[in-house]
């Protein structure tokens, strides 16, 4: 009898366990298991982009890719380069993704075999101007060096680069210092390279020096001082005055008739990142070219790389903007000499 009762209890336990197992169901993933499980991976991003805009985008990315985490180091291009170079010289860096305004530096890293080449299918139709060295890096949205002015102090908007060298702007036009700003360094290089010397050139910079041009370290400071009226105008990246104008500041901007300067801010991946971060980094590149992300860039005031994202907005497309030619090799070979000449001309260090 005892043996029978023991057998009966064992059988009941077995049937109970089987019943419980049959009642278990997979969690509801909305038909997309990846969206809940996530691919995982930790990303460290080094950037010179505005922290609030980058954070908005990164938070959207990790919300769409659960399991991926990130940390952000943000500073000016010069500081970011110094930090990264110091770490690499010391034997390694935590950085996975680079996103700042120094294309020549990216090429130098690529020459050293430090860049992971990756091109999503979505960039196949993007013009070659906006992608580099067969997958070394890509523009994910475009920014340009333009002419901005205070609308309460300037009656006639400038049309081209030479227009801001007149007496109207004496002592009241400002530039970002190329020793600190990657965008300003690119603008300088494009302006003085041989193909553009007759359009802008060193004579333009000398005219600015003779007109008592002012110097700031960042584009953000330029915008603040043009908006306040401390400066009548500035050479600045386009999305800043666009956003300020939309928010009611007395500023406007023009793309110079002879050509604006594309400020390359390529998104690049380091091949020194941990293996478990590689797929997350590639997913981040993919995310950048998704329609919703491109529309987010438009909402942030940027020119999208995928032009359809700008439909219905006042933001131009990359096809609408005339751009001065850029010689990357000239920039790489002559950047030090250009900075020396600039410093002597303006007395900056």
Image (cartoon, helix red, strand yellow):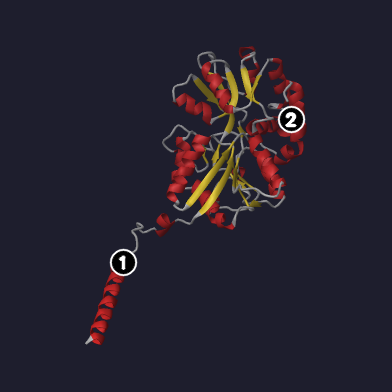
Going by the picture, which residue comes out furthest to the left? Answer: 1
Residue 24, labelled with which disc? 1
Instruction: Give the number of the mark in front: 1 or 2.
Output: 1
In this rendering, the answer to whether 31 lies above or below 315 is below
Of residues 108 and 309, the one drawn nearer to the viewer in this rendering: 108
The part of the image, by quadrant, that contains residue 196 is: top right
The structure residue drawn at horizontal position 76% and vertical position 36%, both measured from the top left corner, is 334
Where does residue 144 sit, x and y in percent of width and height?
58, 33
**SS category of the residue bearing label 1:** loop
Examine the rendering and report whether any part of residue 308 can be seen: no
**SS category of the residue bearing label 2:** helix
The structure residue drawn at horizontal position 36% and vertical position 59%, both measured from the top left corner, is 31
In this rendering, the answer to whether 192 lies above or below 167 is below
Is residue 19 left or right of 146 when viewed as pictured?
left
Examine the rendering and report whether any part of residue 78 can be seen: yes
- Separation of residues labelled 1 and 2 (CA atoms): 68 Å
Residue 339, labelled with which disc? 2
Q: Along the polypeptide, which appears first: circle 1 or circle 2? A: 1
Where does residue 339 sit, x and y in percent of width and height?
74, 30
Q: Label 2 near label 1: C-beta < 8 Å?
A: no
In this rendering, the answer to whether 311 lies above or below 165 is below
The part of the image, by quadrant, that contains residue 35 is: bottom left
Of residues 294 and 346, the one drawn nearer to the viewer in this rendering: 346
Where does residue 276 sit, x and y in percent of width and height?
56, 57
Quarter placement of the N terminus: bottom left
Where does residue 320 sit, x and y in percent of width and height?
53, 35
């Amino acid at each position: 009898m005892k043996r029978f009762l023991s057998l009966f209890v064992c059988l009941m336990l077995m049937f109970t366990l089987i019943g419980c197992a049959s009642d278990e169901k997979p969690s509801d993933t909305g038909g997309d298991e990846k969206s809940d499980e996530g691919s995982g991976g930790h990303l460290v991003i080094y950037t010179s982009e505005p922290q609030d805009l980058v954070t908005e985008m990164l938070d959207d990315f990790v919300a769409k890719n659960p399991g991926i985490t990130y940390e952000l180091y943000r500073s000016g291009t010069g500081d970011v380069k110094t930090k990264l170079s110091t770490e690499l010289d010391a034997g390694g860096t935590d950085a996975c993704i680079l996103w700042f305004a120094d294309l020549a530096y990216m090429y130098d890293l690529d020459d050293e075999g430090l860049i992971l080449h990756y091109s999503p299918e979505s960039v196949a139709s993007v013009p070659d101007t906006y992608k580099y060295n067969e997958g070394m890096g890509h523009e994910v949205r475009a920014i340009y060096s333009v002419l901005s002015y205070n609308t309460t102090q300037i009656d006639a908007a400038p049309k081209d680069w030479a227009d801001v060298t007149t007496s109207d702007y004496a002592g009241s036009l400002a530039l970002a210092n190329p020793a600190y700003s990657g965008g300003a360094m690119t603008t300088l290089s494009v302006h003085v390279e041989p193909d553009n010397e007759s359009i802008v050139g060193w004579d333009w910079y000398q005219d600015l020096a003779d007109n008592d041009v002012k110097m700031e370290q960042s584009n953000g400071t330029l915008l603040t001082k043009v908006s306040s009226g401390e400066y009548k105008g500035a050479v600045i990246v386009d999305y800043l005055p666009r956003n300020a104008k939309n928010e009611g500041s007395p500023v406007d901007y023009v793309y110079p008739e002879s050509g604006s300067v594309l400020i390359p801010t390529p998104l690049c991946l380091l091949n020194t990142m941990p293996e478990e971060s590689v797929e997350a980094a590639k997913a981040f590149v993919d995310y950048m070219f998704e329609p919703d992300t491109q529309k987010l860039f438009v909402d942030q005031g940027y020119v999208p790389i995928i032009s359809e994202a700008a439909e219905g907005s006042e933001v131009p497309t990359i096809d609408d903007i005339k751009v001065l030619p850029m010689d990357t090799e000239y920039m790489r070979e002559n950047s030090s000499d250009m900075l020396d000449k600039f410093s002597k001309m303006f007395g900056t260090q």
